Amino acid sequence: MTTGSLRPSHPLFAIDRVAVALVIVLIGFGALVWLEVVDGAFLYLLFLLATAFVVRTVEVEPGAWLGVRLVRRGLVVVLTLITLDLLTMHTTDFVNVGIALLVLLALGDVALGRATRRLATADEDRIDERQEAMRNRAHRIAYAILATSVGLTVVVAEVATPESRRWLSDVLNGGAIVTFIQLLFFSPAMVIAWIEPDRIADEDGPRMHRDLQTRVAYGMVTLAVALPLLMSLSLAVAPVRVSAFTRPEPALLSPSGERTDPCTYFYARAQAGIGLGARIPLTAVACWNGTTAYEQWGLNASDCVQSVAELATLTTIECRRATASDGSLHFTYRTLLRSPILPFVSREVVMTLDLTKDGKVVQFP
Amino acid sequence: MIAPRSIANASSTRPSMNRALVVLLIVCWLVVAAQLPYSLHGAGILALLALVGLDALLGIMTGWLAFQPTSRLDERQRALRDRAYRMAFRLVGAGVVLMLGLYIVGVILDSILNAGPSPSTSDGFSARTILALVELLIITPTGVVAWLLRSDSEPADWRPARWLPLLAVPAVALVWVAAVLSAPMQSTVVARTPDTGFMMGGATCGHFEGVKRVAAGFGGAARLEAEVCWNGQQAFAFGDPTLPRPASIHPEEFSMPIPGLTSCATLPLDTDFGRVVEQCTGTIDTDGTLHLVLRARVSPLPGGAGSREVQIRLVVTRDGKLVAFD
């Protein structure tokens, strides 16, 4: 039996390059759509991609610890547990604790790449025949794991009961996508880490040189890990940025020809945290008639759900409108922002509108 | 190590035949995965059987190399198989990304061609998507092996036993017929009250979504979407002027149709594996309670044989109490 070229060249339109291009187009498309709302997260994502690119160009050696099979297997077990945890995570949990797990997973994958010298994705000319055979075998085993776990889970969940369909739909909005990506991109490396025997120092290839490129790569990895922590701390430390304005609403004539009560349009936006935080808007029209001040629109419970959280959890503590005995209008919108990475870091943001019965703005926002 | 004859004979197939089968398989897969045309109008089972037939043919042509245990392969075959799996791994990744891209294109085209918001019952994948995903996972390594195999001078093996796997086609057809005729229907209902995305002066509204699937969606599905409002006097479905108008609402306010808000119509993917005819009837009784009933006939088999009657009932009182939704 003869086969076609078993050692293909690297054409411009190789399948892996096309796949990577498609992924970049999709991420770019999504990022453009969300750019308006999640600029900090978008910039961090860009930095992560740049870090991955730079790290990818640096040669790695596993070192004494990761050269030991037992340690590598321990790493694989930890990665598997995190992956399974993400699979069962629903949307709300994913927002709350998923980010911390994601950071752990990313760190584990960096260690995995180091432990296996990124053999799973290395260019053909960088590996010998033994390594290629092992890599191909690892892909076969990883394929069986991927096809069985993904195929069986999806088919059983879809066909079994309506509840299992809803479960699938729910986890797809949560951490299941991360699980799938982990399996798709890292399971061959996990299998290599598992099956490769203990490595003797300097057995395969020269010792890594700590040149400038390597130092930059390590610096970027450190920064990539530290940035979420710094952004979390900014939630508590950085001042809340508030922008606000008011303008009189044009007077209208009622059907009977009388002028309606004077009203004012209120707009405010509070922004807490840097890169990680939330934008809390308050938009409303309130009027007065000398006897009482009242809301026309924008000061209801349904208006306290317009905030946009960015890699943070946001809880509405208070959303209350009241008219005092002197006819003045009071509205309080109080939210609590919490970092999902450092849950003990939080910030309370309060927006207030106090309007007297004769149209005087006592407090806003 | 000596390879079994079935595998050795796999190389006797002319490469053009193997590659033609692979190309045909890709075309069939794209039809299923691309969601274009929007609906297969009951022909989904033909696509499924075509894929199963092509899978069996490719398996026969390659001697089922991708599924053989290592002990039955010689070194070269093992190398070919493992390499095929590595390439298949990347192809599966590319295939899933392609499915996602095609899904986005489908959604954009759908919103352009079918004006108005689409119904949004989110309860998992469509049957067509499941089929595309499972097919991708099962056959990609075999497809790669078939593509890589080159010819030699050995004659093809035409013994009848070699073609037995093709019996999978009638077997799958039989299982499908049994499922669409006897499997219990699956029902999903979602009630969102109050509906924060829709407001009406002097009334409170809720959104109700219901879908019933035959054979887990592999036999078609009936679907109901309703925006039901209530004002203390009456409950009524809003957005479809053909449904009864409540006396407490001004005719002009009620006459405006809002596509997709209240709809007795299937999604295109609901009719991939079965033809579906739906009809809605609504009444508002003297208590002001709304009774909305969807009746549908789902016909997975040609000529209406084995049709199943589907009914979804929605009852909401004038003060918004949900009495029945099943």
Image (tube, coloured by chain):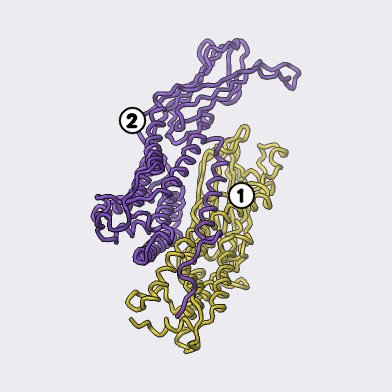
> Residue B211: image x %, image y %?
53, 55
Q: Could you tell me if residue B178 is visible in this image?
A: no
Q: Residue at x 46, y 26 (%)?
A: A272
* Rendering quarter of residue A256: top right
Q: Residue at x 52, y 51 (%)?
A: A23
Numbered mark located on residue A41 in the image: none
- As helix, strand or loop, the secondary structure at mark 2 comes to loop
> Residue A301: image x %, image y %?
51, 29
Is the residue B314 above or below the residue B40 in the image?
Answer: above
Q: Which residue is mark 1?
A: B118
Find the distance from the CA under tag 2 to the CA under tag 1: 42 Å
Which amino acid type is shown beneath numbered disc 1?
Ser
> Residue A158: image x %, image y %?
46, 59
Q: Are marks 2 and 1 in contact (CB under 8 Å)?
A: no
Chain that the image shows in purple:
A
Q: Which residue is mark 2?
A: A344
Q: Residue at x 48, y 58 (%)?
A: B93
